Image (tube, rainbow, N blue to C red):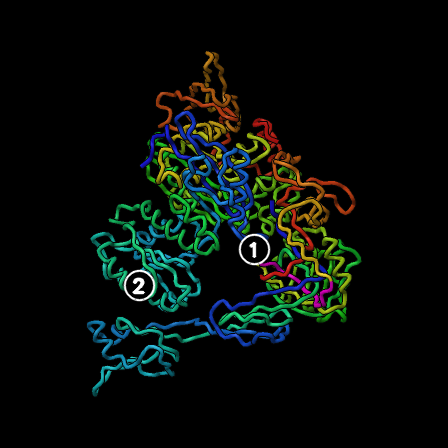
């Protein structure tokens, strides 16, 4: 039972990524949970240390140095829960994104029903679907068996049959799965998660449990018209954790001390996105993006309905996958004319050999950020293809991950995000500069008050409120008039032209009223502007009106493009 | 702070684990001497299966009827045309195996047969002594010599005489450098800029190529070569770092083994070249944290491949010229210039440690 926040717990949360390990401290301050401080160290799973615990202890020691809060006893053991003398911490939580993507084989019945749904469930964890089989698979049974064996899946996800639906087909598919699994070496047999017709789950278990561990969860397709992977994704997260944490020596030391099962960052971030979407405008969405080293998480939610997708590309260990799947000219279109494309290619591919490396010059940073822009474009395109984009746009976009939160200036960061995400409507772009998001998600299950209160605090930075204008008008034509009324009573009026980027400074902590008069041939968002007035919260870049068009079309001429980039950078005071 | 290390060292005791991806048979014993191209373990993996549905083929009403008619047992080996099931009587309906193979299982009236297999052979890749046998999987080979680890490889393996075809660390390998004496050798140079050099090398043929760096535009060509290609510093045109060049010069004409296996994830498998030699004075600094005095190589532009010594670990975060704030050190370069370099952009060099891969 949670105490009142007046008593409160001291909470230590760890976020273990592929490159960095973070330790975060949360405590009650003035009757409310607050984020106190964080530390960052290198993750030490691989060389030269090869032991994850070293990096974790380093991070906690560093946090101890920053805060003065003593976490360790005289024997250098982490103290959980805290003692009467104040040493230690009351609760410990772990979110992680450290592991290689899991090889997943999915089995369903009908391609655009259960097979589609089980693939959506698979996408909620860092994994790679190495085989997907349905009843109508054109391959022979023999080929299916051979192909699944060759793919060496580490996890099998199986769905099929609505709750009053197919049973024979489900059992037939279960027999196929058992035929494959029994051919695998005993110590390499993947566990199975069954997310189909509950009426036949006992029989499925009987067929499969002779060969491997079988888990059950809710039917993700209880009837033809309904799909819900949210509950099943929590069960999947637990199985995923069992598999992945089990591979890491010494991880048991930490996981046995935590107050909840260590949670994949994707699941944790999804919880926060879902929660925020319930408290925000139900017509609009919340999008949380974490561009990590090995993978990228996108959690899109509207009125509590959540879609989590994990993509196998990232800014470090996932960079090679991105480069392999991306045409170079999609990246180079974002270069200024002074960038040598061949040198840029060498630089980008060198990063695949040394994924944690950091660009040291302006040009190198520009090249890397060009890649991140395209990474975000790819992300949005994939989300759209999966039907995971909120149709009415996103009221809140939260960005997490060093690639999306660290830049030489706020303007530089905002420009990269706008170029990459190209949002519609009116969006508040929030930075998770301290990488708190995933830890709030893992804490939320057992201490829900903490993330609620921390989200209301200033732990997250408002980067900008962005008004995106769509129109087919000629460049230079007026698309809207904006009147901004400040708290001190002063107001300013701006005419925004097609093709432009306009910044109105409104400081963090300040608010203003925005009134928009949109040209009848342009649109911001019909639903949004029932009364044409909108409250704007200040931020690092204030209010930004982006009338460059959607989708952003870049000039084919490199010099013209370069001049345009220079203008945009100047507008946002980005280097 | 920790940093990664790359071994470029004249003398090291090495332990390398070589294992099959599946369970198999180990062909060597403890203490046995092996050559780099010896097969030390082998395994058989199934590559094709057939599922014979007796219920359907015999038009039966259920699985029980099928199981009563199946005349084989799990584990039996079948020859071509062997009968699996038959109804019996004068007008017997017969189900035969579609191909020779081994019965894996019989269930629900279906017979699963393994019909094709493939043999996997595990080659030692290192000359040395077997110091440990890993039951059913492989062995650990102990050896010693001068080791040069790289940043990228094309996955191939080769051995031969080292032929250094570069006057300096930055020299580019051109087609004119090849002649009859290059045949069977492991050619080393600073960099390579022309695609046709690969073709000329393959035609000779050579047994391997060691470069400091190479433009990434040539990667597909390198991957297609039958001999190992190892890049010491990575992608670019800057040549090789001076420590590696020094040892390549020192051991020119010696026998060298190149294992260009490479894994780009965090597993730590690096391509490497080993020159067999006895170890005299092995330094074994077991230093993993970044400290002043360490010799380092920078693996990122604009100082790609350059070496230096850490002068000072800078406190907190350092502001780079491009505006990023990072953990950094000052490095005294080989030309005595001082540079501020992010910790993540360098690795330790010459960190000699007996290790297991």
**In screen coordinates, is A528 left or right of B123?**
left
Q: Residue at x 74, y 40 (%)?
A: B338
Circle 1 residues within 10 Å: few <14, some 14–19, many ≥20: some
Segment colored magenta: B266-280
Q: Quadrant of residue A299?
A: top left
Q: Residue at x 46, y 15 (%)?
A: A486
Residue A115 visible (yes or no): yes
Q: Residue at x 39, y 80 (%)?
A: B100
> For the view shown, which residue lies furthest in the right direction?
B167
Quickly name the residue at label 1: B264
Does the magenta portion include B272?
yes
Quickly name the residue at label 2: A208
Q: Is residue A218 or residue B111 the one in the foreground?
A: A218
Q: Is residue A102 or residue A567 the one in the foreground?
A: A102
Q: Quadrant of residue A159?
A: bottom left
**In screen coordinates, is A180 left or right of A321?**
left
Q: Is residue A205 above or below residue A336?
A: below
Circle 2 residues within 10 Å: few <14, some 14–19, many ≥20: many
Image coords of residue B356 (percent x, y): 59, 62
Q: Are marks 2 and 1 on the same chain?
A: no
């Amino acid at each position: 039972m949670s105490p009142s926040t007046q008593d409160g717990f001291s909470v230590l949360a760890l976020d273990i990524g592929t490159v960095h390990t973070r330790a975060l401290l949360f405590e009650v301050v003035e009757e409310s949970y607050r984020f106190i401080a964080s530390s960052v160290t290198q993750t030490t799973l691989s060389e030269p240390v090869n032991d994850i615990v070293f990096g974790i202890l380093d991070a906690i020691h560093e946090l101890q140095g920053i805060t003065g809060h003593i976490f360790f006893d005289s024997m250098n053991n982490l103290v959980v829960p805290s003692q009467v003398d104040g040493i230690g911490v009351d609760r410990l939580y772990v979110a992680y994104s450290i592991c290689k993507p899991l090889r997943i084989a999915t089995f369903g019945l009908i391609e655009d029903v259960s097979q589609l749904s089980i693939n959506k469930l698979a996408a909620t964890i860092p994994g790679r679907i190495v085989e997907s089989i349905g009843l109508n698979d054109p391959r022979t049974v023999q080929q299916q068996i051979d192909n699944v064996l060759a793919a060496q899946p580490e996890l099998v996800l199986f769905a099929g049959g609505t709750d009053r639906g197919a049973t024979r087909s489900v059992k037939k598919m279960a027999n196929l799965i058992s035929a494959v699994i029994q051919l695998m070496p005993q110590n390499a047999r993947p566990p199975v998660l069954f997310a189909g017709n509950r009426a036949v789950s006992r029989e499925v278990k009987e067929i499969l449990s002779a060969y491997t561990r079988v888990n059950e969860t809710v039917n993700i397709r209880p009837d033809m018209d309904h799909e819900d992977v949210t509950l099943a994704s929590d069960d999947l997260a637990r199985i995923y954790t069992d598999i992945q944490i089990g591979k890491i020596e010494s991880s048991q030391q930490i996981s046995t001390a935590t107050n909840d099962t260590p949670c994949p960052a994707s699941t944790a971030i999804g919880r926060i996105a879902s929660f925020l979407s319930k408290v925000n405008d139900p017509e609009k969405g919340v999008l949380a993006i974490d561009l990590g080293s090995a993978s990228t998480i996108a959690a899109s939610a509207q009125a509590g309905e959540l879609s989590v997708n994990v993509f196998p590309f990232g800014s470090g260990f996932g960079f090679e996958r991105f480069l392999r799947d991306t045409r170079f000219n999609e990246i180079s279109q974002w270069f200024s004319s002074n960038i040598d494309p061949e040198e840029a290619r060498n630089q980008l591919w060198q990063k695949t050999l040394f994924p944690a490396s950091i660009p040291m010059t302006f040009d190198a940073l520009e090249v890397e950020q060009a890649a991140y822009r395209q990474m975000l474009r790819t992300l949005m395109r994939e989300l759209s293809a999966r039907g995971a984009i909120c149709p009415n746009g996103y009221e809140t976009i939260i960005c997490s991950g060093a690639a999306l939160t660290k830049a030489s200036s706020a303007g530089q960061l905002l420009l990269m995000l706008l170029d990459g995400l190209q949002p519609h409507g009116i969006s508040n772009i929030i930075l998770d500069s301290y990488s708190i998001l995933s830890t709030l998600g893992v804490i939320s299950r057992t201490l829900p008050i903490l993330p609620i209160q921390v989200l209301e605090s200033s732990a997250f930075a408002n980067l900008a409120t962005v008004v995106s204008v769509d129109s087919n008008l000629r460049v230079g034509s007026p698309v809207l008039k904006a009147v901004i009324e400040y708290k001190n009573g002063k107001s300013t009026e701006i005419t925004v032209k097609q093709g432009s980027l306009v910044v109105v400074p409104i400081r963090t902590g300040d608010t203003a009223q925005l009134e928009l008069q949109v040209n009848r041939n342009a649109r911001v968002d019909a639903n949004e502007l029932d009364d044409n007035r909108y409250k704007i919260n200040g931020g690092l870049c204030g209010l930004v009106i982006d009338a460059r068009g959607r989708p952003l079309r870049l000039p084919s001429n490199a010099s013209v493009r370069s001049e345009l980039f220079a203008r945009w950078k100047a507008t946002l005071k980005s280097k | 702070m920790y940093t990664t290390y790359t071994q470029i060292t004249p003398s090291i005791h090495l332990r390398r684990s070589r294992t099959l991806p599946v369970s198999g048979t180990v062909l060597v014993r403890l203490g046995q001497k092996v050559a780099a191209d010896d097969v030390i373990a082998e395994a058989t993996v199934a590559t094709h299966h057939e599922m014979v549905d007796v219920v359907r083929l015999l038009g039966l009403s259920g699985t029980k009827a099928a199981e009563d008619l199946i005349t084989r047992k799990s584990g039996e080996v079948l020859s071509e045309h062997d009968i699996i099931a038959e109804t019996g009587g004068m007008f017997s309906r017969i189900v035969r195996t579609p191909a020779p193979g081994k019965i894996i299982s019989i269930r629900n009236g279906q017979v699963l047969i393994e019909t094709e297999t493939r043999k996997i052979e595990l080659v030692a890749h290192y000359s040395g002594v077997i110091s440990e046998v890993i039951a059913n999987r492989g062995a650990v080979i102990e050896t010693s010599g001068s080791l040069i680890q790289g940043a990228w490889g094309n996955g191939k393996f080769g051995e031969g005489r080292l032929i250094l075809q570069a006057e300096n660390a930055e020299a580019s390998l051109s087609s004119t450098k090849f002649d009859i004496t290059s045949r069977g050798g492991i050619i080393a140079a600073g960099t390579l800029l022309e695609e046709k050099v690969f073709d000329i090398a393959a035609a000779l043929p050579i047994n391997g190529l060691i470069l400091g760096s190479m433009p990434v535009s040539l990667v597909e060509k390198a991957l297609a070569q039958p001999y190992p290609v190892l890049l010491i510093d990575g992608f670019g045109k800057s040549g090789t770092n001076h420590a590696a060049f020094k040892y390549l010069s020192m051991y020119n004409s010696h026998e060298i083994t190149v294992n260009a296996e490479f894994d780009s994830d965090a597993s730590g498998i690096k391509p490497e070249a080993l020159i067999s030699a006895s170890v005299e004075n092995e330094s074994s600094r077991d230093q993993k944290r970044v400290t002043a005095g360490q010799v380092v190589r920078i693996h990122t532009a604009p100082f790609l491949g350059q070496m230096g010594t850490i002068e000072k670990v800078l406190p907190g975060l350092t502001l780079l010229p491009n505006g990023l704030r990072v953990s950094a050190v000052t490095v005294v370069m080989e030309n005595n210039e001082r540079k501020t370099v992010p910790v993540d952009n360098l690795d330790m060099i010459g960190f000699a440690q007996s290790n297991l891969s």
